[in-house]
Image (tube, rainbow, N blue to C red):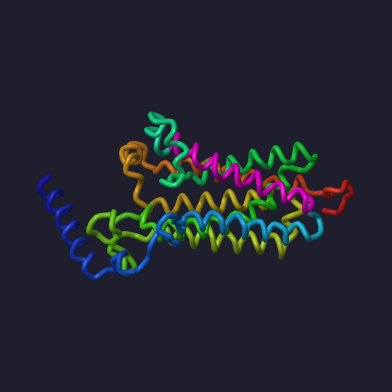
Amino acid sequence: MQAQIAGERALIETLLAAAVAHVRFENLGLDPVAIDLGFFTIKWYSLAYLAGILIGYWYLLKLIAQPGSPMARRHADDMIFYATLGIILGGRLAYVFFYQPAILQNPLDIFKLWEGGMSFHGGVIGVSLGILYLARKNGLSWLRVHDYVACCVPFGLFFGRLANFVNGELWGKASDVPWAIVFPTGGEVPRHPSQLYEAGLEGLVLGLILWFAFWKTRARYQPGMLVGIFLLGYGVARFTVEFFREADAQLMEFAERTGLHMGQWLTLPMILGGLYLILTARSRAGRVAAPDGSARAG
């Protein structure tokens, strides 16, 4: 026991010494507030959501302009509204139920979005429900609409994770890697900048994979293929990065008891669902109906 305590103490001392040599977050000159007018402020986190939605919408219009689109421009215009609503409601409610149930003791706090607290998994569910409603209302293929929307999501993931970094939140575990950073709320030890790992994997890498699948293959003619790639890619990326990310303070005990972070458990269904959609996509290929009722070869 004494040897273990001595070993842990030595590790802490090593990390504290390393903190002196590593970059301190406050020296990066980053400020969570993008615009401060005194009476009104706009944070980078809000701008990240706005940028993700607007750029995603712009890209969606590029995708549906190609042959074989499952929806018309008017459907995409409606989709942006449902997607935004789904992101906000789904993301917030899932965060409250899975990550911070104590908020339910004061229900009005659920609406305090400016204090932070959103779950990507909940946002996915919210957007999916919006797509289902849109498809049912307009007689569209809900799975193919999912395919196209999935290609646009990495934009939001990229900007959102960058905003997490600017906020100095959701940092990683203690580490002595050369690029470790000492975060103000993470104690006097250098940590993995796990927010940047996620921005790179969930945003850039996954976005490039989906770009290639859409533009360079016939994946868009195989219903479920693109959304399957997204679910599998995001699931693997998030599951992997969680090993370098510190669990939420209120969920430390949960992580120690189950062996995995809450984010990893919530990601497992996405990985399994993504694999299923990819493996069965070819069986759904064939003639792809356009939103005007005509058919195009798949």
Asked if residue 12 lies left or right of residue 279, the reply is left
- The answer to which image quadrant residue 210 occupies is bottom right
Farthest residue to the left: give it.
2
Q: Percent position (x, y) of residue 18?
A: 22, 66
Figure quadrant of the N terminus: top left
Q: Nearer the viewer, residue 229 or 153?
A: 153
Instruction: Write the residue at 31% across / 38% down.
Output: 253
Residue pictured at 75% horizontal, 37% vertical: 136
Relative to 209, 73 lies left or right: right
Residue 164 in the image: x percent, y percent?
Answer: 42, 56
In the depicted structure, whether residue 235 falls above or below residue 192: above
| For residue 135, above or below residue 29 | above
**Where does the magenta region start and end?**
70-98
Q: Which secondary structure dominates the residues rendered in magenta?
A: helix
Q: Position of residue 273 (x, y in %)?
A: 60, 42
Of residue 97 and residue 67, the one placed in the foreground of this image is: 97
Q: Nearer the viewer, residue 106 or 228?
A: 106
| 72 in magenta | yes
Is 199 drawn above or below residue 227 in the view shown? below
Q: Residue furthest right?
A: 294
Residue 81, percent across and down? 66, 46
